[in-house]
C-alpha cells in the first residue's frame, strides 16, 4: 500500500505538471503595409499591420525608428479596428532603413509578442534586418497556466465523478451525508480543497505575470504601483479573471457548505456536490473564452464551443480518472478478495462508457482545433504538426488500453478476447497504466499548446489598399480606402501640387451607391499634415459599385469605386473542406456521447397515442409560431426597407465628376434660372436635399417644386442628370458652412 501511495503521489504530480490547456498559441500577423524588407521609392504616409486576432488597445503599441535608433513615429491600435496596429509617419523621411517595433497584446488570451519589421526608403541596406517574435514560452506563464488548468480540471473531475459515477455505483442510504462512506467523502473534500488552493494561487500569479507582460515591468513595480489593478479592470483578461474568481468563490462556498452541513443537514450534501459540477463546467468555459479559440478567424463562436466541449471532455476523462485513482485506495480499503473486486467493478462499469464517450469527444474536437490551424500539407512537418502527430500516437495507445478495460468489463460480449481480458482482470495495475499513458498524452497536449501555430504561407504579405489618383486643376489628388472592403474604413486623401504637399484645405468625402440611389453623409476629412486628409466611416456596407465624391477646397469631383472583399483576409481566413469535415465529426461525437442519455430519456416517455398527439401538436405549434414570427419580422423589415429606401425607378448613370458638375452648372443657369429668382423657396429645397434621392430631384426638374417652375428647354436625359449632380454640390456648400461654424464656435 505504501508503494501504491507513492505511485499515486507521482501520478498526481505528473497530472499537475502535464494537464492540457485549450489551444492558446499566439495570433500572428496577416497583412503588412509596407511588407517586411520592402524597398520604397518615397516615404510612406503610414505603416499598418493587421493581425489574426483582436488586440488590447491599452497594451499594444508600435514604435518606428530610423537606422540610428531614433524614434520617428509612434502609434497604437486603430480606434475602429482592433486588429490593426498603425502609426503615421512624418513627411519626406530621408533615405535609409527604418524598423517598426511591434508590441502586441492579444485580447483573446492575453499573450504578448514583440516583433520587429524593417523597410527601406531609397536603397536596401545590408546588415539591417527585423526580428521575429520569440517562440519560447515564458516560464512564469507556463507555471500559472499549469496551476490553473490542473486545478480546474481536478475540480470538475471530482464533482463529475461524484455525481455521475460514485453515487450511482456506491450509493448507500445509510450514509446520509452524500450517500457515500465518510472516508470517501473526506477524500473528495480534501481533493477539492487542495485544488481550490492551487486554483487561487495560480489565478493570483496569472494576474501578476500578465501585468508584468502588459506593462513590461518587474514584479516589484507591478505590486508597488498597483498595475495589477489596471489590468484587472481595464483589459479583457481582467474581465475573464474577475468572472473566474467569482466562480472559484462559488465553488469554495459549495465545498464549505457540503462540509459544514454534513451533520446538520446531511441530505443537502449531495445537492451541493451536484451543483459544483455545473459551476465547475462554467469555470472550464472561462478557459475557452480566454483561449486562442476566441480569436479564431473562422467561426469563432463554433471554435469557442468546440474548445469548451474539448475541455469538458478532458476534465472528465483525465481529471475524473486522476481523482478516481486517488479515491479507490481509500474506498476499497475495508474490502478483500471477491468483495473488493465487486466494489471496484461497480464504479468502473459506470466510468468506462462515460470515459469512452469523453475520449471520442476529445479526439473529434482536437481534430477540429487542429484543422483550424493545419491547412496545408507542408504544415504537418512544422513543429506544431509534428507535435500533433506525437499526441495522436499516444492517444491511439490510450484508446487501445481503454479498449482492453472495456473488453474486460464485458467478458460475455467479447469471448474471443478472453485471454486478453484475463490479464487485466484485477484492473488496478492496468488502470494505473491507463492513468500514466493519459498523463503522457497530456504532456504532449501541453507541448502542443506551447508550440506556435503554423502561419499561412501568405500571412504578413502586403496587399495594397485600393487607391486612385486624379487631377483637379493644378492639384494631384490621391484617394485611398483602407482596408478597402465592407465595414469600417479610413478614407485618406493626399493633395499635392507637383511634389509639394498642399495643406489647410477643406476636404470632404461622401459615398454613394447609384444602384440603390443611396448617399451617405458628408465626412469632413481631418487635416493630418503633409497634404494628408483623413476620415473614417462605415458607409461601405456591401460589395459592389460605389461612387466616391470628393470636395477639395470647394471644387467637387467623383471617382467610380468597386468595393470587394479584402483579398488578404479571404486568402487567410476562408474555411476549407477539412474544417467542414472536422465540424461534422464534432457533431457526430457529441451525438454519440449524448445518445445513452437520450435513450434513457426516451424510455421514460409516456408514448400513449393521446400523449404523443398532444406533444406533436404542441411541437408543431411552437415551430409554426417561431417560423411565423421570424417570417413576420423579415416581412416587416422588408416592407420597412421598401418604404424607406425602395429600389429606384430611375438610376443616375452619370458619374458626378468635375466635368459633369461643370456641364450641370451651365445647363442649370440656362434652363433653371427661374429657381434663382425665388431664393427663399430654393434654399428651402436645398435644406431638404439630404432627404431626397436622385430620382426625386430628377423629377423636380421636370415638374417643379412648390412655386419653382420646371426647368425650361429641351434638356436631354444626360443634361438633367448633370444638373442633378450640380445641385448636389449646393447641398455640400451648406454642409461646409455649418461645419465651419461649428469648428469656429
Image (cartoon, grey):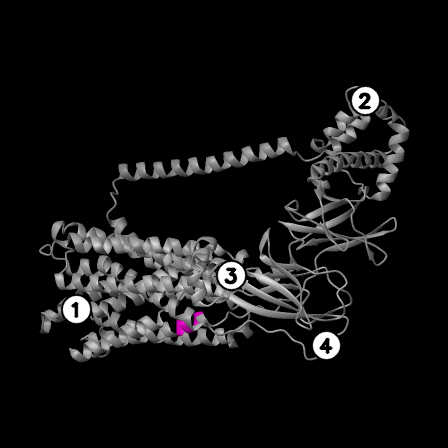
Q: Residue at x 20, y 74 (%)?
A: 428
Left or right of 63, for residue 628 = left
Quick check: 725 above or below 564? above
Q: Quadrant of residue 676?
A: top right
Q: Label 4: which residue?
A: 125
Q: Quadrant of residue 674?
A: top right
> x, y (%) of residue 203?
36, 62
Q: Residue at x 77, y 71 (%)?
A: 122
Around disc 1, counting alpha carbons within 10 Å, would you say few (fewer than 14), some (14 to 19), or many (20 or more)? many
Q: Label 3: which residue?
A: 106
Q: Which residues are magenta?
A: 444-449
Left or right of 387, for residue 178 = left
Pair 4/2: label in front = 4
> x, y (%) of residue 328?
18, 69
Compute the Cα span from label 4 to label 3. Answer: 32 Å
Do labels 3 and 2 touch, CB within 8 Å? Answer: no
The quadrant of the picture occupied by the C terminus is top right
Q: Is residue 539 visible?
A: yes
Q: Label 1: which residue?
A: 344
Q: Residue at x 45, y 73 (%)?
A: 388
Around disc 4, counting alpha carbons within 10 Å, would you say few (fewer than 14), some (14 to 19), or many (20 or more)? some
Quick check: 164 above or below 432? above
Q: Quadrant of residue 190?
A: bottom left
> Which is more toward the observer, 657 or 494?
494
Compute the Cα span from label 1 to label 3. Answer: 47 Å
Left or right of 48, for residue 193 = left
Q: Is residue 357 visible?
A: no
**Residue 708 shows which numbered tag?**
2
| Element class at badge 1 | helix
Amino acid at each position: 500500500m505504501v508503494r501504491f501511495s507513492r505511485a499515486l503521489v507521482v501520478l498526481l504530480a505528473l497530472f499537475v505538471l502535464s494537464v492540457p490547456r485549450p489551444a492558446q498559441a499566439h495570433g500572428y500577423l496577416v497583412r503588412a503595409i509596407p511588407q517586411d524588407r520592402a524597398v520604397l521609392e518615397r516615404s510612406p504616409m503610414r505603416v499598418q499591420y493587421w493581425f489574426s486576432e483582436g488586440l488590447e488597445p491599452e497594451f499594444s503599441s508600435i514604435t518606428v525608428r530610423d537606422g540610428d535608433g531614433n524614434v520617428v513615429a509612434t502609434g497604437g491600435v486603430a480606434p475602429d479596428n482592433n486588429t490593426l496596429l498603425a502609426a503615421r509617419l512624418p513627411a519626406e523621411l530621408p533615405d535609409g532603413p527604418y524598423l517598426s517595433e511591434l508590441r502586441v497584446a492579444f485580447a483573446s488570451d492575453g499573450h504578448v509578442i514583440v516583433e520587429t519589421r524593417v523597410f527601406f526608403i531609397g536603397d536596401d541596406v545590408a546588415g539591417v534586418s527585423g526580428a521575429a517574435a520569440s517562440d519560447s514560452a515564458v516560464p512564469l506563464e507556463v507555471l500559472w497556466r499549469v496551476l490553473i488548468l490542473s486545478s480546474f480540471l481536478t475540480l470538475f473531475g471530482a464533482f463529475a465523478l461524484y455525481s455521475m459515477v460514485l453515487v450511482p455505483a456506491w450509493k448507500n442510504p445509510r450514509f446520509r451525508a452524500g450517500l457515500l462512506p465518510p472516508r470517501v467523502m473526506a477524500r473528495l473534500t480534501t481533493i477539492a480543497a487542495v485544488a481550490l488552493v492551487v486554483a487561487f494561487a495560480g489565478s493570483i500569479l496569472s494576474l501578476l505575470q500578465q501585468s508584468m507582460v502588459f506593462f513590461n515591468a518587474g514584479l516589484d513595480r507591478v505590486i508597488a504601483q498597483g498595475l495589477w489593478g489596471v489590468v484587472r479592470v481595464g483589459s479583457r483578461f481582467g474581465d475573464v479573471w474577475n468572472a473566474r474568481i467569482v466562480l472559484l468563490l462559488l465553488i469554495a462556498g459549495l465545498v464549505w457548505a457540503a462540509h459544514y452541513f454534513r451533520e446538520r443537514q446531511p441530505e443537502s450534501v449531495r445537492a451541493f456536490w451536484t451543483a459544483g459540477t455545473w459551476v465547475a463546467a462554467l469555470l472550464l468555459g472561462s478557459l475557452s473564452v480566454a483561449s486562442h479559440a476566441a480569436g479564431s478567424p473562422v467561426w469563432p463562436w463554433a471554435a469557442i464551443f468546440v474548445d469548451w466541449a474539448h475541455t469538458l471532455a478532458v476534465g472528465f476523462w483525465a481529471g475524473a480518472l486522476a481523482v478516481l485513482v486517488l479515491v479507490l485506495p481509500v474506498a476499497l480499503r475495508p474490502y478483500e478478495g471477491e468483495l473488493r473486486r465487486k466494489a471496484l467493478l461497480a464504479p468502473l462499469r459506470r466510468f468506462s462508457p462515460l470515459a469512452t464517450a469523453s475520449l471520442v469527444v476529445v479526439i473529434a474536437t482536437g481534430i477540429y482545433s487542429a484543422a483550424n490551424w493545419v491547412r496545408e500539407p507542408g504544415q504537418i512537418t512544422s513543429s506544431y504538426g509534428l507535435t500533433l502527430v506525437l499526441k495522436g500516437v499516444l492517444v491511439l495507445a490510450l484508446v487501445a488500453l481503454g479498449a482492453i478495460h472495456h473488453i474486460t468489463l464485458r467478458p460475455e460480449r467479447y469471448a474471443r478476447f478472453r485471454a486478453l481480458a484475463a490479464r487485466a482482470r484485477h484492473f488496478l495495475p492496468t488502470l494505473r497504466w491507463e492513468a500514466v499513458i493519459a498523463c503522457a498524452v497530456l504532456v504532449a497536449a501541453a507541448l502542443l499548446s506551447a508550440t506556435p501555430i503554423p502561419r499561412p504561407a501568405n500571412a504578413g504579405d502586403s496587399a495594397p489598399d485600393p487607391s486612385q489618383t486624379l487631377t483637379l486643376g493644378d492639384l494631384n489628388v490621391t484617394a485611398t480606402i483602407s482596408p478597402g472592403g465592407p465595414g469600417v474604413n479610413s478614407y485618406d486623401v493626399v493633395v499635392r501640387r507637383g511634389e509639394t504637399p498642399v495643406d489647410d484645405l477643406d476636404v470632404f468625402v461622401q459615398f454613394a451607391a447609384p444602384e440603390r440611389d443611396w448617399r451617405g453623409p458628408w465626412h469632413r476629412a481631418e487635416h493630418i499634415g503633409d497634404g494628408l486628409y483623413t476620415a473614417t466611416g462605415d458607409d461601405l456596407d456591401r460589395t459592389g459599385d460605389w461612387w466616391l465624391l470628393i470636395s477639395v477646397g470647394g471644387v467637387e469631383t467623383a471617382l467610380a469605386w468597386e468595393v470587394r472583399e479584402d483579398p488578404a483576409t479571404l486568402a487567410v481566413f476562408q474555411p476549407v473542406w477539412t474544417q467542414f469535415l472536422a465540424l461534422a465529426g464534432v457533431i457526430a461525437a457529441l451525438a454519440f456521447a449524448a445518445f445513452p442519455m437520450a435513450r434513457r430519456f426516451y424510455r421514460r416517455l409516456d408514448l400513449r397515442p393521446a400523449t404523443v398527439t398532444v406533444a406533436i401538436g404542441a411541437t408543431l405549434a411552437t415551430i409554426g409560431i417561431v417560423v411565423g414570427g421570424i417570417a413576420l419580422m423579415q416581412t416587416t423589415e422588408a416592407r420597412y426597407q421598401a418604404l424607406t429606401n425602395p429600389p429606384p425607378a430611375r438610376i443616375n448613370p452619370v458619374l458626378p465628376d468635375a466635368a459633369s458638375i461643370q456641364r450641370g452648372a451651365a445647363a442649370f443657369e440656362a434652363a433653371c434660372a427661374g429657381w434663382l429668382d425665388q431664393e427663399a423657396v430654393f434654399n428651402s429645397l436645398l435644406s431638404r436635399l439630404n432627404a431626397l434621392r436622385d430620382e426625386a430631384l430628377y423629377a423636380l426638374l421636370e415638374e417643379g417644386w412648390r412655386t419653382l417652375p420646371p426647368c425650361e428647354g429641351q434638356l436631354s436625359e444626360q443634361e438633367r442628370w448633370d444638373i442633378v449632380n450640380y445641385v448636389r454640390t449646393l447641398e455640400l456648400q451648406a454642409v461646409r458652412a455649418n461645419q465651419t461654424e461649428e469648428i469656429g464656435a
